[in-house]
Amino acid sequence: MGRKATSKPTSKSVKRMRNERASPRKILPANFAAEVAAKAAAKSLGKPQAKSPARPRSNLSEKAANAATMGSPGKTADRSVAKLARPQSKTARRRPAKTAAKPWTPAEIEEAFRRFREANPSPRGELEHVDPYTLLVAVVLSAQATDAGVNKATRGLFAVADTPQKMVALGEEKLRDYIRTIGLFRTKAKNVIALSDKLIAEHGGVVPPSREALEALPGVGRKTANVVLNVAFGAETIAVDTHIFRVGNRTGLAPGANPLEVEEKLEERVPPVYRRNAHHWLILHGRYTCKAQRPLCGTCLINDLCRWPDKAKFRAPAASEAPTAR
């Protein structure tokens, strides 16, 4: 039997061996090889890696302990340890949780709406319409748009199509031309034509005074149905839009995580005598006084009742900024 042929080392491997002999070796922890093997095995099996055993320096972070063990002797290692062992800054410390605001009392709620009624006895919505159908179309178009922008578009539209039959005859393509300045006009045009068709087919071209029937129409949700029921049919509903949602949460009058929670709390807390117009008072208050960016807390009718902790930060507005009764 002859000897097995052994492969000769290549020039690269020879060079690597020489470099390894020339370079100083790092001093590794005694359990370094075991840790590497355990991590590799856990990775190959798809299991979470086990934590390494704690270092003897329990009062320092892992990086500080490594710096003290592996770093060069002298001031460098001492500075690293001292820097990493410093206590947390004031901004990094845990802040105490905010306590919930004190709920409004029934007397305070009564007083707030008494002031709203005194300032504006007959509030009205700002969407222009002539009947329940034009109101329904205007509210559908007002989603993610301003009332002023919707009114500008519907003035020309309602002059040629103010009934479901005329709207269907106008068609989706021509309807888009009238509402092109409104956001999401393509989707809204499709919904207006579809709801007009359904009104003709299922309700004789008449807007139904029922929440279930209204919400079954294309493009009509709970908020739209509440507006139509309140404005067109006199129902004591409260349509929670972005303004009322902000007022309810900011003032603490009716806090909620979503519009439905705010709506339910308002319906529960608003006295019956004010419920018919509560929707209008709150939406106008949020639009012109309790604004999202610059609330006019200095002239707010319910400033003394409001639970918002930041209301003192906003100065009284100039005379030109003061809201007028609507």
Image (cartoon, rainbow, N blue to C red):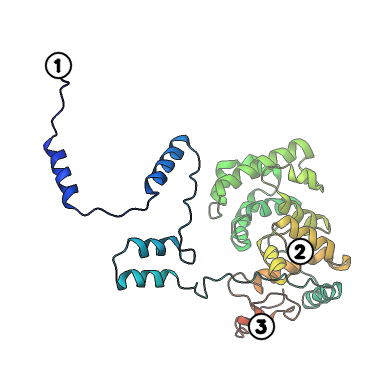
Residue 33 in the image: state x and y as whole percent: 37, 45
Q: Give the mark nearest the N terminus, 2 or 3.
A: 2
* Residue furthest to the top: 1
Quadrant in the rendering for residue 231: bottom right
Marker disc for residue 279: 2
The residue wearing badge 1 is 2
The residue wearing badge 3 is 298
Residue 190 in the image: state x and y as whole percent: 60, 42
Quadrant in the rendering for residue 318: bottom right
Label 1 neighbour load within 10 Å: few <14, some 14-19, many 20+? few
**Viewer-proximal residue, 8 or 48?**
8
Secondary structure of the residue carrying numbered label 3? helix
Three-letter residue code for mark 3: Gly
Three-letter residue code for mark 1: Gly
Q: Do the residues bearing badges 2 and 1 touch, measured as CB atoms within 8 Å?
A: no
Q: Quadrant of the N terminus?
A: top left
**Viewer-proximal residue, 300 or 200?**
300
Label 3 neighbour load within 10 Å: few <14, some 14-19, many 20+? some
Q: Is residue 170 above or below residue 305?
A: above
Rounded to the nearest angstrom, the CA distance separating label 2 from label 1 is 102 Å
**Viewer-proximal residue, 16 or 170?**
16
